Amino acid sequence: MLKRRTGLIALVILIAFVLTACGSSAPKQEAAKTPDKLPLVRASHQPCMHALPTWMGIEKGWPKDHGIEIKYMFFPSGAPQIEAMAAGEWDVGAMGTVPALMAALRYGTYTIAISNDESETNDVWVRKDSPLLKTKGFNPKYPEIYGTPDDWKGKTILTTTVSTGHYAVVATLKALGLTEKDVKIVNMEQSQAIAAFESGQGDILQLWAPFDYIAEQKGFVKVSSGKRAGVDIPGAVVVRKEFADKNPELVVKWLDMYMRGIEHMKKDKADSTKFLGRYFRDYCGLKLDDTIAAKEFELRPLYDLDEQLKLFEKANGTSKVDKAFADLAQFFVDQGRIKPEEKDKVLSSNFATDKFLKMLKEQRAKQGK
Amino acid sequence: MKALQNFLRKNILSIISLVVFLIAWQIITVYEIVPRRMLVPPTEVVELFFDKLNNPDPDGATLLAHFKTSITLALSGFGLAMIIGVPLGLLMGWYQRFDNLVRPIFEVMRPIPPIAWIPLAILWFGIGLGAKSFIIWLSAFVPCVINSYTGIKLTDPVLVRVARIFGATDREIFFKIGIPSAVPMVFTGLRLSLNSAWMTLVAAELLAATEGLGYMIQMGRRLLRPDIIVLGMLTIGLVGAILAGVLGKIEQRITMGRRM
Amino acid sequence: MIAIKRSNQFYNFVSIAGVLLLWQLVVSAGLFGKLVPSPVAVFKEFIDMLQNPIGGRSLFMHLWFSIKRVLTAFITAVVTGVPLGLFMGWNKKVDAIVKPVFELLKPIPPIAWIPLAILWFGIGETPKVFICFVGSFVPCVVNSYTGMRYVDPLLIDMTKTFGATRRQQFIDVGLPASLTAVFAGLQNALSLGWMCVLAAELVGAREGVGYIITLGMDTANPAMIIVGMLIIGAVGAAIAVIVRRIERIVCPWKRGITS
């Protein structure tokens, strides 16, 4: 009797080991797949337009032209993306301004280029019957914002706090002479906020692309955005500090391809729109059609290499990019999210640098482009 | 004094173990055996703990406020689970037909993780306390049902037969024999249920929260502050352990003398 | 006997049909606006998902990914958790050393481990398996511990009298006597591990049943969310049934309460 039981236990353990062996062998195979002929750059991106230069480049077989191999890594949002960077999982990537600033503060990452201008796609929405829609341009300085301060006062705003969207909301309130204390801010993730808003919760909804296109499809109306409220929200191209310090030439090679993507997007909108549509649908699984992809191109200005250099050009000590980050950092100080000395520390670190853009410019000049 | 000595002598190994755990944690973080970005040293967590006692920045509320919000939430979900789950479990255990009706739905709903319900919870209950309590209720409800069910199933059939011989009605048997004999199991269920409620906090506070320990962890993520995340986790752990300990003691009192 | 069984199944059927009917009626009556899909719409979505890939993978591939993660986590939890629990139950010193740390970490839900899991393990399979592991580990330890603690002291005393060594007592008396409790723990561990799959797949997954739910949330597609939930529910229920069958074979001396 006892023997049978020991046999049984042994069997269970044996099965366990066999199964664990199966489970653990899978990742190893994956690692073996990447050939190490060309140097590997691991690029991290989100379901967003600023992923397109990399994604399209891979689809079109560009990486080998630039002498690199790219591993494409996908993140639903900025927080897990940064956490993965801290774990050393990726080298370069594109993300929103907020994670870029936070990552610079905590992990010393560099912002080396601007993926696009996201000021218009960080926006604020209401339902069709909202009283806000009666008035437009209450403050003549901000003609595109809907509603009077009285309309906004006391309203419930669904927003993802500590984000560029939150920043756009507070800027809008400021444009109307209000502060956050005049409204009720409810913190929600984007997708949940849409569902809640649709079911009648809250009065005002803050979103960003591509969620705002879903809102548009559902018949909500845009009442403000970062741009309308006068704040700059540039999308950041970020590199991990250790990687950039060790392999600046690889960063430039990847940046070359990324900029090639942006230049292609500026030149051949029709072709790029198709790729963006495919990226949304086939890769990200979002049900967004090509008209929405086309809208992305309308609402998000892109910058080629020379325009990028201009954004980073320091007139009187600060560049446009520096100013955008400084304003954002001040916003977080006002909110009590970071300490004033942390703001000074991150801004004085010059994490937004045109070093790599300049290297790229030189390299291209040498190649006679 | 003597009591303290006794306590120390009794728990000397546990105390040493905790101290060693903390020292090891401190050493691997301070000497960067584990990179600092992966883990913060415990001294920093303690420092943050004292700072958070009356500083609402940077996550929007003091630790005490977070705790109060969370415990209210957990208790509200737990309360509802008790009111609905225990009678349901008792009825399922006693009436075979009722069991057959309810069980399939219960079995399919049970493994669905609470977070998955968030979108539906918003549709049904909005974004206030209701939706969050519902998420907690879902997980707190399960142990209430299962233990009440098992408890009443364990009723000694001899007792039931005796009662029947003496002419008791079904209802009388249910209330006077079934329920009392299920009490110890029901109490175990309540203890497990409160633990589940407490553990579902983080999921529930993913939903439109502006305060609470789960929200604190979420903010720690957005602000890239691992120390806030770890403080949130440890507070949840510590409170959970205390709850479990206290309820375990109460349970021992109640069930004492019943288990012959 | 057969008649009773049939009537059991009849009631089960009535209950499920009743819920579906009620659901359909509530939705048709428009009580929740257009936001909650009817069972018919959910079924259509399910058929659609069977035919078309979701995020580049078929529904079965998603299911397989989730199952693989949970099984890997479960087995790791069993291999580490059961011996730990048994030793804690057997040896007071081990118990005193492990207990405080274990009790402190036990109430921390798997979902709260996500940030640290990413920081420690990146975003491959490991953090996902880790999240499920956290969920499975606790019941493995707790049940093995309880099982060992409740071994009848009389049995141990008897073997002692007959001159059994400490090791013999552990292997020949302690282990078999606690097997029932251990098995109950495994059952719980597998169910809980499966319940963690959604939390685990919040860690940047692009495959798995949890991913289907997240995708449904991101695309504001409630039908997809409900299909995902029902798949998780159905697989969870199936796991419970299968484990109960296995238990009846492995531990035949344990009489089920229901039978």
Image: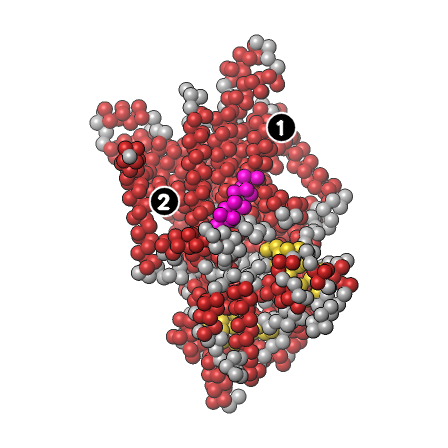
| Residue at the spot of label 1 | B98
| Residue at the spot of label 2 | C101
Q: Is residue C76 above or below residue B58?
A: above
- The magenta segment is B63-76
Magenta stretch, main secondary structure class: helix
Q: Quadrant of the N terminus of chain A?
A: top left
Circles 2 and 1, Cβ within 8 Å, touching? The answer is no
Dot 2 lies on which element? Answer: helix
Q: Is residue C57 above or below residue B69?
A: below
Dot 1 lies on which element? Answer: helix
Left or right of residue B250, residue B19 in this image: left
Q: Please tell me which residue lies in front, C4 or B241.
A: B241
Task: Give residue C236's position: percent from left, percent from top.
Answer: 54, 42
Q: Is residue A113 above or below residue B71?
A: below
Q: Tell me the amino acid under the disc marked 1.
A: Phe
Task: Give residue C125's position: percent from left, percent from top.
Answer: 45, 56
In which chain is the residue bearing label 1? B
- Does any portion of residue A125 appear in the rendered image? yes
Q: Is residue B67 magenta?
A: yes
